[in-house]
Amino acid sequence: MCGIVGYIGNKKAVPVLINGLLSLEYRGYDSAGVAVLNPNNSDYILKVVKDKGRVKILQDNSELETITGNVGIAHTRWATHGMPSKVNSHPHLDNSGKFAVVHNGIIENYVDLRKKLLDNGYTLYSDTDTEVIPNLIHMNYNGDILEAVSKTMKELKGSYAIEVISPLFADKIIVAKKDSPLVVGIGEDENFIASDIPAVLAHTNNFYFLDEQEIAVVEKNLVKFYDINLNEVTKDIKNIEWDAESSEKNGYEDYMLKEIYEQPQAIRETIGSRLSLDKKVSLGLENVDFKAFNKIYIVACGTAMHAGIASKYAFEKFCKIPTEVDMASEFRYRNPLIDEHTLCIFISQSGETADTIAALRLAKEAGSTTISIVNVIGSSITRLSDYTLYTHAGPEIAVASTKAYTCQVTLLNILVINIAESLGYESKELNSFKSSLLELPDKVKQTLETNKLVKDFADKVYTQKDLYFIGRGTDYAVSMEGSLKLKEISYIHSEAYAAGELKHGPIALIENGVTVIGIATNPITTEKTLSNLEESITRGASVLVVTNQNIKNDKIDYIINVPETDSILSPIISVIPLQLFAYYIAKNKNLDVDKPRNLAKSVTVE
Ligand code: M6R
């Protein structure tokens, strides 16, 4: 996830672009840059200033003072392909230096496109997927920029919101989008482009929204829209009345809610081109001899560890290797039985968690192979691990992790397929598992529609003191995550139990005024979990069930129906109502959901 801004009008472009980038920093902040068409005699030249680091570093760059042009594009980056560095930052130029491009999204077929460009004599200077775009535009340009952009779009697979400027058409910015956000803001004798409304809300409340695979030609007094085949499209302007605070969060009240709603896209980007039905998964682990392992350890903290617990079932089922999940803080001090026959998988959103780093070092000393699942590119864990696989969740700002979790579970399951295929365990079941994974972004989107019912239940039970989550198998795994989410942002005491364990002690706590949330998505265990819920109802508990089974039971207060999927993948879906539940409870209690007390986003101490 990155942020892009564009300006065309009579003002100096740089200050407008920098202010826009500052309000988009929540989308990414590892490098930033601008490209402006600067007057040069009777012509224009492209001036590009960019650097690693936050927008402030760019803002303080004295080179910007020499730029007076009125047409420009800008970018703040959240690295996905290529480390944060000056050469990898945007804007990127084509080899002729005539086309400058900024891009938000992921070009999934960039390896093939890079090869095509290299075969055609182009040089690529960065490690990014983006650099193919200006060069493809150059390759496809025969004097008509719209045709060149349309041809280029047809070659790109993946997601993109792009802006293109060039001295060859100095009165225009060309923009295009697919699966990444882009808006055009309308002013008087000036127009604006941005990833999100907040970036330009100081200048206008009137916006056009681009639809999928559309192109816009933005001039200072005119905006025209086209589909990918260059048929003109008409659009209505929408008036957006947002206050400054809500605009920063793109209209959401809190980052946590925004991040919950970003999950379909984040999962889609994490799957990217890694998974398809017609070929084997390839995660760049060809040098790993998976036959050498007799044990897998998954090690992490908090929500990341819960992602590991939710995925353990898949490792054992499809890879047939005994798999243990451990808290990094325990693993590092308990002399775990690991050696060169152990595969150790570390999970971390930040890539900076002190306990996870220490556990990783221990595993390396013991000679184990280490693979890490990380969200923040270039973070410490990625530098220490033998192999790193990135979730493409984008920056997660709320302390309570939401989209990182669903992306971690998604990527772990893709890793499962990679290992199973390397071990020769292909099967019909594995193929249908792949299909189920590919359906997840749409199903998660559908699941977000449970929000009203979940809020309703939260409104009723938010004053309660104790809350329990129960489930079996992967439903138990997701119960732990639901319980952690609730604890950390609502400060309500909560525990997760394997449903069958309730009668071995915890049921003594169930009485009037207690709430029990059951997760029942596995057809084999649903009846059993329902019986355990009935036992709780009999003792006075209010009960909510999250299920994809056809449950008819009048005694249950709320039934949240979620889409069906392979029960191994169900945590990715059933966690959504639990995240929303924790969120609405905390909102009812007027708490700061993004910054809960006593917690930090990245725990870099023991
Ligand atoms: O950055 P990491 O994924 O390594 O962080 C691990 C935990 O600190 C983190 O998941 C924590 O539990 C979250 N606040 C939970 O929402």
Image (spheres, rainbow, N blue to C red):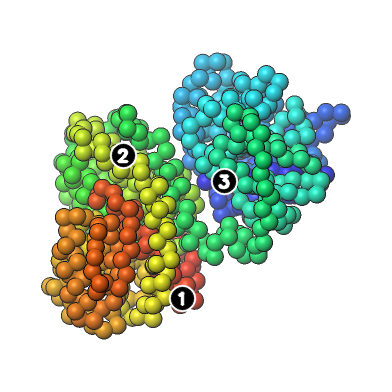
In the rendered structure, the answer to whether residue 223 lies left or right of residue 288 reads: right
**Nearer the observer, 54 or 362:** 54
Q: Secondary structure at mark 2?
A: helix
Residue at image coords 33%, 39%: 386
In the rendered structure, the answer to whether residue 259 lies left or right of residue 276 reads: right
Location of residue 454 (image quadrant): bottom left
Question: Which residue extends farthest bottom?
Answer: 512
The amino acid pointed to by label 1 is Asn
**Pointer 1 residue:** 588
In the rendered structure, the answer to whether residue 322 lies left or right of residue 228 reads: left
Q: Secondary structure at mark 1?
A: helix
Q: Label 1 crowding class (10 Å Cα cut-off): few <14, some 14-19, many 20+?
A: some
**Nearer the observer, 291 or 422:** 422
Residue 383: percent from left, percent from top: 41, 43
| Residue 133 in sight here | no
The mark found on residue 435 in the picture is: 2
* Cα distance in 3D space between marks 3 and 1: 31 Å
Question: Which residue extends farthest left?
Answer: 504
**Nearer the observer, 57 or 522:** 522
Of the image marks 2 and 1, the number of the one nearer the N terminus: 2
Residue at image coords 74%, 54%: 203
**Mark closer to the observer (2, 3):** 2
Residue at image coords 24%, 51%: 567
Q: Label 3 crowding class (10 Å Cα cut-off): few <14, some 14-19, many 20+?
A: many
The mark found on residue 181 in the picture is: 3
Of the image marks 3 and 1, the number of the one nearer the N terminus: 3
Query: From the viewer's perspective, is residue 56 above or below residue 599?
Result: above
* Cα distance in 3D space between marks 2 and 1: 39 Å
Of the image marks 2 and 3, the number of the one nearer the N terminus: 3
The mark found on residue 259 in the picture is: none
Contact between marks 3 and 1 (CB within 8 A): the answer is: no
* Cα distance in 3D space between marks 2 and 3: 26 Å
